Image (cartoon, helix red, strand yellow):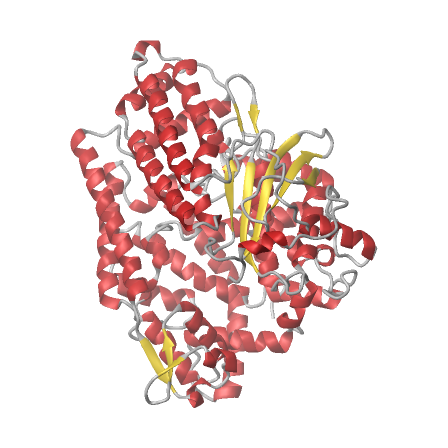
Amino acid sequence: MEMTENQSDKTSKQKRERNLLAFTGAAALAALALSLAISALNSRRKKSNKKDLSGSNARINLSASEILKLADRIIAKSKEVHDAVASVPLDKVTYANVISPLADLEAHQFPRVQSCVFPKLVSTLEDVRKASAEAERRIDAHVSMCSKREDVYRAVKAFASKGEWMNPEAKHYIKCLVRDFEQNGLNLTVTKKQEVQRLRAQIEELSLRYIRNLNDDSSCLLFSEAELVGLPTEYLKSLDKAGNGKYKITLRSHNVLALLELCQVGTTRRMVAAAYGKRCGEVNLSVLESLVELRHKYARLFGYSNYADYAVDLRMAKTSTKVFEFLEDISASLTDLATGELALLKDLKKKEEGELPFGIEDLLYYVKRVEEAQFDLDFGALKQYFPVDVVLSGILKITQDLFGLRFQEVADAEIWHGDVSVFSVFDLSSGELLGYFYLDIYTREGKYGHTCVVALQNGALSYSGERQIPVALLISQLQKGNGGHSGLLRFPEVVSLFHEFGHVVQHICNRASFARFSGLRVDPDFVEIPALVLENWCYESFSLKLISGFHQDITKPINDEICKSLKRWRNSFSALKLKQEILYCLFDQIIHSTDNVDIVELFKHLHPKVMLGLPMLEGTNPASCFPRSAIGFEAACYSRIWSEVFATDIFASKFCDDLVNHHVGMQFRNKVLAMGGAKEPIEILSDFLGREPSIDAFIDSKTKYSP
């Protein structure tokens, strides 16, 4: 994070061709055209006569005091609208005096809320970041209060009960409004409502305690240099040393994963894996047992038999039974392939370490050894073919051609840092302005540390028929190059950038009438599917050449052999890796769908069953250091696999044979991206595919590239 605000003064001297469409780093393009396109992406301008973005209500450079004042105005306006809705006599409720005010409020308030909230992620000023966090706290508290207003709930419920004709999207919106209130217990008795609030507070406290215990864990192991053979010198230099000269391995994931992947000493790998799996053993086991018990009680207050059914009911999967069937079908379908993969690893260990049994702690190390032998992939050298600007320009080219879009950089738009660029998005055929997106992709001090997409304004259609356009922000942590040269990306960063830009396109192409269903506000089992579909372009020769170019001569993309190796590498040992993930997903689903489970015994039983006979490491307790089950993904750990499976089906069925099929791309845009959350996800996918989604293509993709 070496960036400073002075970066904004390091503008390119080339000012021409700002509005060029993005070109690519393919060898077929002339070097001059490429340099012009890249300068269009990379040029920065002096901040004078800054332009507002027509149609965007997001305010991006508020001071700390302005943020807090805006937050107070947001809260006051929200209270005014909710009070007005609540005052409507129940026999006088109409769409115009109850539903429309709430829908319009949400649409109009969203960009104003985001104007207060997003600065904490990107601002260079500490006082602004603090004010943004405080504004978010105030707004969240107000939203929470509104979600518990019985007077507003009664008005909405009264209108819903009238059964008046509405279009399907409006009907779906009203159903969601009612459901949101009832998820807060407003349809329950007073006693049950009080119990809901009490349980919710206890669950939140225990969830945070579980994470806090893991974060506070400072346990470490000491090893001599001989016990760490295989680890690179840079890794060893990064470690602290104890008084006896031994290296101190703290049990943090980045340390542990590197060691399990690279250390040649089997006993060291086993000791580290065992210690990592014992963290917070008894204390977090007790916390998780209490959490699960409280969650079941919470779900039963709402009429569900267990917490898994409560959590999954509002998702694409719908029932925990469906989740079990899905996970078990995937696991069973991968068994033969995984057995072959494991046999290969066991043979290699036998050659290197003799008759020592193969354990779960050996998995990462021997997978890497086989991959090094099978694939001619030097990821350090490969990085030279992925300059940031070439990758970005290729991504823009692919997505605009595929989905009938036109991207145009906005000159002299107001920005919060000199590294930020802004693009308008137009429909290629009609010229209609569809939305905007900001790119804030380079690392700097004080900036949010992960790659993500933030919606700054949701698309919506007002009651009067006026359309509000979407605005998105892509945040990343890429390194800038030295001496004015474009920074170079590791291949996983390329994939991540393409994935997140998929979310940008998903947000911009949404045409839902309600802000509630716009862009990324969709079913969590569905939200990742479009971006995962687009990740596939990172592994196909045609598109890989469009997003690559040697940094010293960007007309030279990566060659065909590397493209083929990347595709094979993607699926290398994927069955074993996925089985390990399924193991944790099954565990998560079982504890949240069954009473009085012995958590330790459950893991001991599941581990060899799913992992082809490999036992759990003796004395470990994975449930004590599995945060996804504690907070954020409880009873929903399956969701990532679910999304990947159906994304693979879409790509294999519709795009695989013709990566630039504009007709199919437009179908995807109009039938999938445009819908957002306005329809049930299974309806959306079935309409696009012409059938219900299937796991078959996913299984085929794994077996095709088996070792």
Is 142 above or below relative to 161? below
Q: Position of residue 615 (x, y in %)?
A: 37, 73
Q: Identify the residue at horizontal 77%, vertical 45% (top origin).
A: 16
Is 185 above or below relative to 373? above
Counting the numbered discs, the total is 0
Q: Identify the residue at horizontal 38%, vertical 78% (top origin).
A: 249
Q: Please name whichever residue, 624 or 339, is drawn nearer the observer in this view of the structure.
A: 624
Q: Please name whichever residue, 557 or 83, is drawn nearer the observer in this view of the structure.
A: 83
Would residue 7 appear left or right of 217 to someone viewing this image?
right
Q: Identify the residue at horizontal 37%, vertical 56% (top origin).
A: 628
Q: Please name whichever residue, 239 or 530, is drawn nearer the observer in this view of the structure.
A: 239
Q: Position of residue 606 (x, y in %)?
A: 36, 64
Residue at the top extreme, as displayed: 92
Q: Quadrant of the C terminus?
A: bottom right
Q: Position of residue 395 (x, y in %)?
A: 67, 50
Residue at the left extreme, as displayed: 191
Would residue 444 appear left or right of 636 to someone viewing this image?
right
Residue 155 picture quarter? top left
- Whether residue 653 is visible here, answered yes or no, is yes
Would residue 211 appear left or right of 579 to someone viewing this image?
left
